[in-house]
């Protein structure tokens, strides 16, 4: 019972008690717990020792009023399920923790109207926003986003009005097809992403351009939606018409893995009968059999860069907005039939 009383007392520790224990002013305690820099190192150490010893918890609402910050960054993604988004959030979260920030993460389920609603809901609750919504065009994004909310876009752009990080999907897909052609593949199918997805459109365009440049190569577009089920369904069609295909380029790794599983179950050998290349280089890609050749994207690094940029804007950076292109690379593994390099 005595322990319970002590616990209740710890929860009621005030800033005045912390100041008395540290031998400093209440103002000094406030500056330390609110992260201000204009505090001498010995004072900061004394305050933090008292905070930890007494179990002081700053009142978040009061601190938000004083600093006009919530300490939250909003993250809106098309989905929050799967290895790609897990890696992305991991990168954002690590960078946020280093800066004492917390995340408010939501999924729009690939719905543009839901993304609009989430943007409205987060305004006034978060200090900044990281938004990935590949279904919104530039004009729609500009209209939806609040002018006073620091925002970073992922894989979509709004001209020079909002910071953005984008992958050169066209060039990456083009590179993947050129690689398949270089190892002797001529009947290359593409498992596409959703028709209204900006990234899917760019990857399909890169695929079509590379084949057109090579001349006389067979093309086939199989519909997909970035899920393993879609990849498996495409794999069934490829297996049923195996003589028509000797390679597959999937618009993401998850569909590539679904296709790989189906082809293997159908008795086809990957890569001898059909080579497969994916996109993203999710962690699982290097552990399947055969290991998956793919377009390498530093997914966690992309998340980190986005958080670093939105934090800089929250912190007062007022330089011109940037549209930054993230570089990709071809990761050659066993599924394409070439000599693996990774």
Image (tube, grey):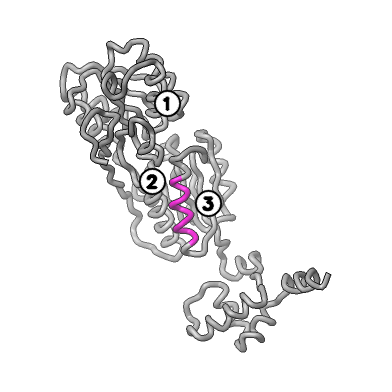
Q: Dot 2: few (<14), some (14–19), or many (≥20) neighbours within 10 Å?
A: many
For the residues labelled 3 and 1, the Cα–Cα distance comes to: 32 Å
Magenta stretch bounds:
87-97
Which one is in front in this view, the residue at disc 3 or the one at disc 2? 2
Q: Earlier in the sequence, mark 3 or mark 2?
A: 3
Is disc 1 placed on a helix, strand or loop?
Answer: helix
Identify the residue at the far bottom of this view: 23
Q: Residue at x 31, y 27 (%)?
A: 276
Residue to which mark 3 is pinned? 74
Res. 200 image quadrant: top left
- Please tell me which of labels 2 and 1 falls first in the chain: 1
Count of numbered marks: 3
Q: Quadrant of residue 232?
A: top left
Q: Which residue is mark 1?
A: 258
Report which residue position mark 2 lands on: 299
Residue 37 location (% of width, % of height): 47, 77
* Element marked by disc 2: helix
């Amino acid at each position: 019972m005595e322990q319970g009383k002590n616990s209740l007392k710890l929860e009621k520790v005030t800033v005045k008690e912390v100041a008395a224990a540290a031998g400093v002013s209440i103002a000094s305690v406030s500056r330390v717990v609110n992260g201000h820099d204009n505090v001498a190192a010995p004072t900061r150490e004394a305050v933090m020792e008292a905070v930890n010893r007494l179990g002081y918890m700053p009142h978040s609402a009061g601190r938000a009023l004083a600093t006009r910050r919530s300490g939250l960054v909003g993250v809106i993604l098309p989905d929050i399920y799967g290895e790609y988004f897990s890696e992305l959030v991991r990168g954002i979260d690590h960078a946020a923790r280093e800066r004492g920030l917390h995340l408010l993460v939501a999924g729009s389920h690939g719905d543009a109207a839901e993304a609009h609603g989430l943007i409205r809901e987060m305004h006034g609750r978060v200090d900044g926003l990281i938004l990935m919504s590949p279904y919104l065009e530039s004009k729609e994004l500009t209209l939806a986003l609040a002018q006073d909310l620091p925002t970073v876009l992922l894989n979509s752009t709004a001209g020079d009005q909002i910071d953005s990080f984008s992958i050169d999907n066209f060039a990456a897909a083009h590179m993947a097809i050129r690689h398949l052609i270089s190892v002797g593949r001529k009947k290359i199918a593409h498992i596409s992403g959703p028709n209204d997805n900006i990234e899917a459109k760019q990857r399909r365009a890169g695929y079509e351009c590379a084949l057109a440049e090579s001349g006389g190569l067979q093309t086939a577009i199989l519909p997909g939606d970035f899920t393993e089920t879609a990849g498996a369904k495409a794999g069934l069609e490829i297996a049923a018409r195996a003589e028509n295909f000797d390679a597959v380029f999937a618009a993401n790794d998850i569909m590539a893995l679904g296709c790989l599983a189906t082809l293997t179950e159908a008795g086809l050998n990957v890569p001898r009968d059909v080579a497969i290349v994916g996109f993203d280089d999710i962690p699982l890609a290097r552990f399947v059999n055969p290991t998956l050749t793919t377009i390498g994207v530093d997914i966690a690094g992309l998340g980190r860069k986005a958080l670093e940029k939105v934090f800089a804007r929250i912190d007062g950076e007022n330089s011109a907005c940037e549209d930054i292109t993230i570089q990709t690379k071809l990761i050659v593994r066993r599924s394409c039939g070439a000599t693996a390099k990774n």
